[in-house]
Amino acid sequence: MSWCAMWNISHFRALRRLLLSEIHTCCRVEAMKAAGKHLPRVYVTRRIPPDGMKILRQSGICEIDQWDSDDPVPREELLKKVAGAKGLYCLLTEKIDEELLRAAGPSLKVVSTMSVGYDHLSLEDLKKRGIRVGYTPDVLTEAVAELTVALLLATSRRLIEAADEAKNGGWGTWKPLWMCGNGLSQSTVGIFGLGRIGEAIAKRLKPFGVKRFVYTDIGPRPEIAARISAEFVSMDELAKQSDFITVCCALTPETQGICNKKLFSAMKSTAVFINTSRGAVVNQEDLYQALSSGQIAAAGLDVTIPEPLPLDHPLFKLKNCVILPHIASATVETRNAMAALAANNLLAGLQGEAMPKEVPL
């Protein structure tokens, strides 16, 4: 049998399985309707990657209402649409607080966020109402680590600045000191928040010839640290010893604004600061002062406060600050995996089953 014929048979079988799945779903929905049963309604707050919607639609256990746009649902629309919903599929742009939960009413039983962070959720209010919460850790670890390394290299080697010079006529004769940045070889890299992402970043940086990894956290993380040969130090020592600092911590009341004047003033003047966690862990006014005064060499940010950062913000005017529009998890594979996990969390919650990834309340 030719390769072409084999491909056609395989393609036909795949289409047959898809068709049978769709028929099964339709039959289940129609059977429930005939029995006089109403499907629980879920509200999806954004246009999401196809793998997530496919899982929800093919489940046949819920009625889907969706804000079909790439832009966030307006607050007034969200408050209106969530009323009477049993499930809510949201993103980190939606604030799930007391006001929203009152608007939803007692029918809401599960909230599933397509994000690893959940600082946009009022966990205390959700717990009071017995509402279960799903989130999407693990699946974006590799993508975030890759982006962090890319941002670190772009910042430390002044790639954006150099590209602008090439386009705008600044590229003249070769100059020994022009566009010089800082290399990773024999450097010390500090990791603030040594979890899955911090470990993945260290593994990617090691082949560049990094001499030493140090980290700080709420406490020592000996198992992870042993895998990457990292040393636990205080926040002050992290600042003093590191040539590069990468921020990977969660946003909590304790970490909000923790990267401030005290941290930057303790850093080396040649040091590079990278943040791919949450914008609110950084005091941006203090960062601007540190960058503009030469207190530190450069910074790379994938997250800011607010998002998007206003075009007239002072940080945009600095050549030694690279700002990206929160794209750390932006690979097709990762976003589809996040969407699918959030969908499966939602469906499990609707059926009273164990979620693949549930926030402990």
Image: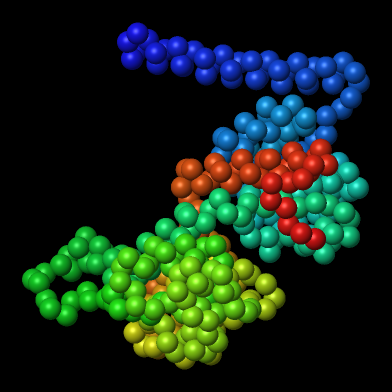
Question: Residue 234: which quarter of the image?
Answer: bottom right
> Looking at the picture, how far across and down is residue 108, in whole percent?
84, 46
In percent of the image, x 66 and y 45: which residue is there?
342
> Looking at the picture, how far across and down is residue 350, in whole percent?
80, 40
Residue 147 as seen in the image, left or right of residue 286: left
Q: Residue furthest left?
A: 173
> Which quadrant of the figure contains the C terminus?
bottom right
Is 45 above or below relative to 186?
above
In percent of the image, x 50 and y 72: which residue is there?
226
In percent of the image, x 76 and y 59: which residue is there?
360
Residue 130 as seen in the image, left or right of residue 24: right
> Looking at the picture, how far across and down is residue 132, in whole percent?
80, 51
> Looking at the picture, how far across and down is residue 23, in whole percent?
68, 15
> Which quadrant of the figure contains the N terminus?
top left
In percent of the image, x 53 and y 75: which residue is there?
192
- Residue 103 in view, yes or no: yes
> In this orientation, which residue lies closer to the viewer: 235 or 97?
235
- Residue 261 in view, yes or no: no
Is 122 above or below relative to 114?
below
Is 12 above or below relative to 304?
above
Residue 84 as seen in the image, left or right of residue 334: right
> In this orientation, which residue lies closer to the viewer: 282 or 289?
282
Question: Residue 337: which quarter of the image?
Answer: top right
